[in-house]
């Protein structure tokens, strides 16, 4: 995802700060695949192919009057796919999920992720920084230093070299 990776790298790509904060809030890890390396994401590519073959192709030509009807039809086909035994396996995708993965899932956080804006500011001689015509005090030892501001409608967080 080009908008999530700010700098691709061979070993360690740099993830967009906002996307990394989103993933952290929901307890996820971002592990992007390398560009033009389809083997890095073979399971995902295969899952997309399977869904096209088993769900999308069976709905070709059908017309839906609302989103709810479309979602019901999609669920019908995905439930059938997930309940069917996998090729050369003694279990279905649903059985495997219930046995291995379900107990490892965590509940979502109570609060939704709130995207925060970022701004860089220099601490003025009076030990304040300005943000949208409001002034916030900063310890005097940071006068003249650059700080990073993360803010939304309710909070302002000030960081100096990644420290609160």
Image (spheres, rainbow, N blue to C red):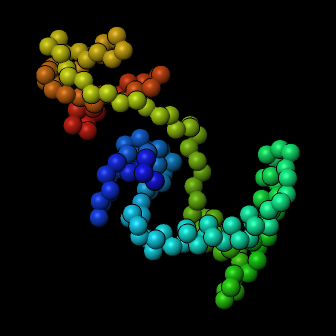
| In this rendering, position of residue 4 left or right of residue 104 | left
- Using the rendered image of the protein, determine whether residue 79 is visible from the camera's viewpoint: no
**In the image, residue 158 lies at what x, y percent?**
30, 28
* Residue 22 location (% of width, % of height): 47, 44
Count of numbered badges drawn on the protein: 0
In this rendering, would 131 be left or right of 78? left
Percent across and percent down for residue 3 are 43, 47
Q: Is residue 33 left or right of residue 137?
A: right
Q: Residue at x 45, y 26 (%)?
A: 152
> Splitting the image into 4 quarters, where does residue 87 fall?
bottom right
Q: At which x and y percent is residue 13? A: 32, 57
Q: Quadrant of residue 60?
A: bottom right
The residue located at (56%, 44%) in the rendering is 109
Q: Which quadrant, please, contains the C terminus?
A: top left
Which residue shows up at 40% across the image and 29% down it?
Answer: 117
Q: Is residue 5 visible?
A: yes
In the rendered image of this protein, does residue 144 appear above or below residue 58? above
Most extreme residue toward the bottom is 88
Q: Nearer the viewer, residue 160 or 38?
A: 38
Picture layout, residue 113 above or below residue 102 = above
Q: Is residue 122 above or below residue 69?
A: above
> Which residue shows up at 74% across the image and 63% down it?
56
- Is residue 23 rendered to the left or right of residue 49? left
């Amino acid at each position: 995802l080009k908008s999530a990776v700010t700098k691709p790298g061979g070993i360690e790509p740099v993830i967009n700060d906002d996307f990394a904060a989103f993933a952290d809030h929901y307890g996820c890890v971002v592990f992007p695949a390398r560009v033009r390396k389809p083997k890095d994401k073979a399971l995902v590519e295969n899952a997309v192919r399977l869904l096209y073959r088993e769900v999308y192709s069976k709905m070709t030509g059908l017309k839906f009057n609302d989103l709810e009807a479309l979602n019901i039809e999609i669920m019908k086909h995905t439930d059938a796919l997930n309940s069917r035994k996998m090729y050369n396996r003694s279990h279905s995708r649903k059985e495997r999920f219930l046995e291995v993965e379900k107990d490892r899932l965590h509940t979502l956080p109570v609060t939704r992720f709130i995207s925060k804006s970022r701004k860089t500011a220099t601490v003025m001689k009076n030990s304040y920084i300005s943000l949208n015509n409001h002034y916030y005090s900063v310890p005097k030892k940071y006068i003249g230093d650059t700080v990073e501001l993360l803010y939304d409608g309710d909070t302002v967080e000030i960081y100096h070299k990644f420290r609160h």
